[in-house]
Every structure is written in C-alpha cells, then in structure tokens.
Image: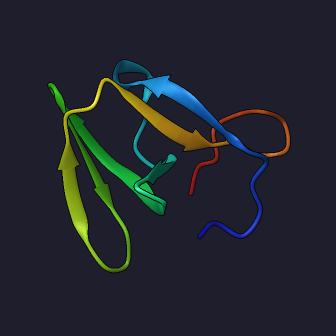
Amino acid sequence: MVNQHYGTMPVIRQCLEPGMMALRDGCAYRVSAIRGKHVYLHSMREQIRITDRVVEVFLDGFGNPLTH
C-alpha cells in the first residue's frame, strides 16, 4: 500500500501517465505504460495488463495524482 495518500479519484485511461499510482482490486500498482487500449500496471509481486476505461488513482496532499 502507498504510505501517504489522500483518497482516490477515477481517471479516464487517456489521462493516465507512467508513474501514477493506481488502485486495482484492493492493491496498489504503478502505471508503467499506456499503449492503445491497454494499460500496464506493475507492483513488486506482479504485472498486469488491463483494458478498463476508468482507473482509480491515488491523490497527494494537493489533490493531484500521486506519482512515484
């Protein structure tokens, strides 16, 4: 889990950027790449490819997406 975050916000796939921290099935992932309709997420344990149109991202203290 991410140490310090201030909630989550749904973001459409086209607005994601590599490095953003995303929430998927209760686990925290880092967005590694966006290619066409696929979003690649990875964590210390696994890498996944999703085709969701909306992804939950963690927010920092200013309300911006949390990046790593």
Q: Is residue 10 above or below residue 1?
A: above
Q: Give the percent coordinates (x, y) of residue 45.
A: 31, 80
The residue positioned farthest toward the right in the image shown: 61
* Residue at x-position 26% and y-position 72%: 46
Q: Give the percent coordinates (x, y) of residue 68.
A: 56, 57
Q: Give the percent coordinates (x, y) of residue 40.
A: 24, 48
Image quarter where the N terminus lies is bottom right
* 18 on left or right of 5: left
* Residue at x-position 48% and y-position 60%: 26
* 15 on left or right of 68: left
Q: Is residue 6 above or below residue 68?
A: above
* Residue at x-position 55% and y-position 41%: 57
Within the image, what quadrant is residue 44 found in?
Answer: bottom left
* 18 on left or right of 1: left
Foreground: 62 or 27? 27
Q: Is residue 34 above or below residue 45?
A: above
Foreground: 65 or 6? 6
The residue positioned farthest toward the bottom in the image shown: 45
* Residue at x-position 77% and y-position 63%: 4
| Display colour scheme | rainbow
Q: Give the percent coordinates (x, y) of residue 62.
A: 84, 36
Within the image, what quadrant is residue 47 found in?
Answer: bottom left
